[in-house]
Image: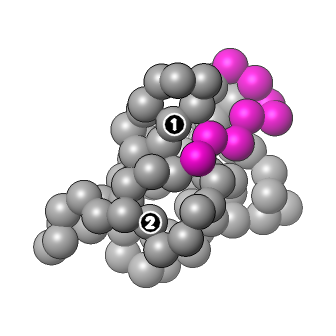
Amino acid sequence: MPDSVTRYGAQKFGSASARPRIVSVYRGAGGWTAPPDRIRLTRGTAEELRELGYTMVRVRLRFRTHEVFIRRYLDS
């Protein structure tokens, strides 16, 4: 289910259908950068970003910005 939302995502964003927009991605060596494309945070995109070496994402949903560890998002 690559487009599904994890349990942690549903709790953090208040809805099982919430798919916040990724505005920044973090990699230890490079710091915060713009995401490769305009993408939404789902299980599939989180797995892809983790494979590329990213550890955190900054997302925007309902006029609020949140920082989310990819590992925590996927482990739930």
Residue 52 falls left or right of residue 48: left
Q: Is residue 18 left or right of residue 12?
A: right
Element carrying mark 2: loop
Query: In the rendered view, would you say 75 is above or below 50?
Result: above
In the displayed image of the protein, which residue is found farthest to the bottom?
52
Question: In this orientation, does residue 72 appear?
Answer: no
- Residue at image mark 2: 35
* Residue 45 position in % (x across, y down): 62, 65
Q: Which residue is mark 1?
A: 60
- In this view, 75 is above or below 18: below
Residue 25, horizontal then vertical, whole percent: 37, 59
| Upstream in sequence: badge 2 or badge 1 | 2
What residue type is disc 1 on? Arg
- Mark 2 and mark 1 in contact? Answer it, CB < 8 Å: no
Q: Residue visible at 48% across and 24% down?
A: 64
Magenta extent: 14-21
Q: Quadrant of the N terminus?
A: bottom right
Residue count near mark 2 (Cα–Cα under 10 Å), binned few <14, some 14–19, many ≥20: some
Residue 42, magenta (yes or no): no
Q: Position of residue 26 (x, y in %)?
A: 30, 60
Please tell me the numbered disc located at residue 51: none
Label 2 to label 1: alpha-carbon separation: 13 Å
